[in-house]
Image (cartoon, helix red, strand yellow):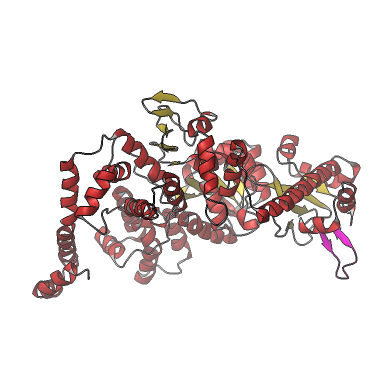
């Protein structure tokens, strides 16, 4: 928040607004004790697991582990950026957001959005006029019905050099404003302007909130480029937008999964057949910013790119990008190099859904299949390369059952002994940033805990945050790292950092937690802390004792690991050498080495 808005703005908003009132606009809340409960708006459930603490201005869901403050709730509910959510709440609270540069930028943005709205109006009117006959014919040839034309606001740019620009000039806009919106271009002599889009079927590109930020235009013949997008503007960046997101976001939330395709027509066709969680990239490889957009609405993505070689290369890249942002990724490869538009037009919805059910695979299995198809030989080097290509993905999984499943899958597909595959997977260190929880920047909690089922670390952390006495007792007895779980330790350090700044400010602590991606963790700790009547001294002392003895357990675990590795490899010489050098090993471990 700092760096763009004064921190005091959020404090003023919280003084005037109640998080219970904000949440109650979306779901029905029932009071139980000092908290409110309801059905989570972010996932499907029958028993309320979503709770709101009015005292701490926080919410938390025990079902999907989402949580945070009121601004986080608005961001997640409406798919807003931080600045947008803050401005929305500020306007509602009657709090003035003073930022001159921001105000000038907002005015320019509004002008471009209005220009785009009028351009949509012009393209739609043209499609319905005699000048749009070619566009009507093209859409009819592609079997796009009127309801899809209306749902996605499709239109037509006539074969005219200045039809749109003259229309906008009459509406009071200047040529340089149209240029800034990417709707016109300027000739090299810089003496005249001409329309950017001519003789193209027009696909307005809407942001998550429905505002049209740009356009894609499909040429009617075999000219080049086949699709022409709006250039980069104040409001449009290809890497930060997804076609169809506004139309798909509610369905994505309900299903808990987004389907990502490559083309405008693929997306349109899927919606036409009732598969309304589909979105499309904008003619470029999927980006981290687009993955982050999807993460606002769901945790899972099904990638359905074209079945040709180019589409499959992009699929591999999409897996890496989506997984790097913490999304769970499945892949569907269509037969015969088809794209979704072709498959649906040829086989229909039921066959498409049936094909998904029987042919979707996890990102790991996709990588294995893809590698086996592209490897020219199946010698031992090729098999080792295939295992290396998915090693980090498998090792980043939380579930031992899943790890075992993929180990056995590799064993079957590569015709190797399971123990050989297991040893190969165990070699080396896991890299960061790969698919799975280890690569999840937001560190989404995936333990699916039931209400009341907390770890001992979480109980101690919640008590330390809720009761200064407990925190002081812990820090008097110990210093340095208290918690094994990184998210717990980071949250404690943020809390202590806030207290060092002077008088403790809960709003500042929440802000720091949100900026670190730990809003949900803090929400969980707030809920637990409110249910505790402090903690017995004996329980705190037991935890302190366990922290002090953690070093001894670490020595044993590392010792056991070395012995087990030597046993599995059957290397007697290595085992004997390790035993003879045991004193050195123990010394290095105690000093923080090895």
* Residue 410 placement: quadrant: bottom left
**Residue 372, how many percent across, how many down?**
43, 62
**In this orientation, which residue lies closer to the viewer: 576 or 195?**
195
**Residue 496, how many percent across, how many down?**
34, 53
Instruction: Decide if residue 478 is on the left or right side of residue 87.
Output: left
* Residue 249 placement: quadrant: top right
Give the magenta part as a residue range.
Answer: 184-195
The C terminus - image quarter: bottom left
**In this orientation, which residue lies closer to the viewer: 442 or 123?**
442
Say whether residue 488 is visible.
Answer: yes
Q: Measured along the vertical axis of the image, is residue 583 above or below residue 236?
A: below
**In this orientation, which residue lies closer to the viewer: 497 or 462?**
497
Q: Is residue 521 magenta?
A: no
Q: Is residue 187 magenta?
A: yes
Q: Residue at x 87, y 48 (%)?
A: 172
**Residue 289, how many percent across, how many down?**
56, 55
């Amino acid at each position: 928040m700092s760096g763009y808005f004064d921190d005091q703005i959020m404090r003023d908003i919280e003084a005037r607004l109640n998080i219970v009132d904000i949440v109650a606009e979306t779901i029905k809340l029932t009071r139980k004790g000092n908290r409110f409960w309801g059905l989570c708006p972010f996932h499907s459930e029958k028993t309320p697991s979503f709770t709101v603490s009015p005292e701490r201005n926080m919410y938390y869901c025990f079902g999907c582990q989402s949580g945070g403050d009121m601004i986080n709730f608005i961001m997640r509910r409406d798919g807003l950026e931080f600045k947008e959510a803050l401005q929305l709440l500020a306007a509602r609270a009657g709090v003035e957001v003073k930022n001159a540069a921001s105000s000038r930028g907002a005015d320019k943005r509004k002008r471009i959005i209005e220009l785009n709205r009028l351009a949509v109006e012009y393209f739609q009117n043209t499609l319905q006029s005699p000048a749009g006959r070619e566009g009507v014919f093209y859409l009819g040839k592609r079997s796009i019905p009127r309801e899809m034309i209306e749902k996605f606001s499709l239109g037509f740019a006539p074969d005219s050099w200045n039809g749109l620009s003259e229309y906008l000039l009459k509406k009071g806009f200047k040529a340089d404003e149209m240029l800034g919106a990417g709707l016109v271009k300027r000739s090299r002599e810089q003496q005249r302007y001409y329309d950017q889009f001519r003789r193209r079927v027009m696909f307005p590109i809407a942001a998550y909130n429905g505002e049209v930020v740009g356009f894609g235009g499909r040429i009617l013949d075999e000219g080049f480029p086949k699709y022409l997008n709006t250039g980069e503007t104040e409001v449009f960046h290809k890497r930060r937008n997804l076609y169809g997101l506004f139309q798909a976001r509610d369905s994505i939330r309900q299903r808990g999964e987004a389907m990502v395709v490559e083309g405008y027509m693929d997306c349109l066709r899927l919606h036409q057949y009732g598969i309304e969680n589909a979105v499309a990239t904008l003619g470029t490889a999927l980006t981290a910013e687009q993955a982050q957009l999807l993460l606002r609405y769901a945790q899972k993505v099904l990638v359905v790119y074209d079945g040709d070689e180019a589409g499959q290369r992009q699929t591999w890249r999409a897996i890496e990008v989506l997984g790097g942002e913490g999304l769970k990724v499945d892949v569907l490869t269509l037969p015969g190099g088809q794209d979704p538009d072709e498959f649906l037009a040829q086989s229909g919805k039921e066959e498409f859904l049936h094909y998904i059910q029987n042919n979707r695979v996890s990102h790991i299995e996709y990588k294995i299949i893809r590698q086996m198809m592209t490897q020219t030989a199946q010698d031992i080097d090729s098999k080792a390369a295939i295992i290396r290509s998915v090693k980090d993905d498998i090792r980043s999984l939380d579930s031992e059952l899943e790890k075992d499943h993929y180990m056995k899958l590799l064993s079957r597909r590569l015709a190797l002994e399971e123990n050989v595959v297991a040893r190969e997977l165990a070699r080396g260190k896991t890299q960061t940033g790969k698919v799975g929880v280890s690569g999840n920047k937001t560190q989404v909690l995936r333990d699916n805990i039931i209400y009341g089922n907390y770890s001992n670390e979480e109980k101690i952390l919640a008590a330390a945050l809720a009761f200064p006495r407990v925190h002081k007792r812990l820090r008097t007895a110990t210093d340095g790292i208290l918690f094994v779980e990184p998210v717990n330790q980071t949250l404690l350090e943020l809390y202590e950092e806030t207290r060092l700044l002077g008088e403790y400010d809960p709003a500042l602590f929440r802000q720091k937690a949100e900026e670190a991606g730990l809003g949900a963790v803090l929400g969980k700790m707030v809920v637990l802390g409110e249910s505790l009547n402090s903690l017995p001294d004996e329980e705190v002392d037991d935890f302190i004792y366990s922290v002090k003895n953690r070093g001894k357990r670490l020595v044993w675990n590392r010792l056991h690991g070395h012995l087990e590795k030597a046993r599995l490899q059957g290397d007697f010489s290595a085992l004997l050498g390790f035993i003879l050098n045991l004193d050195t090993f123990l010394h290095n471990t105690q000093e923080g080495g090895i």
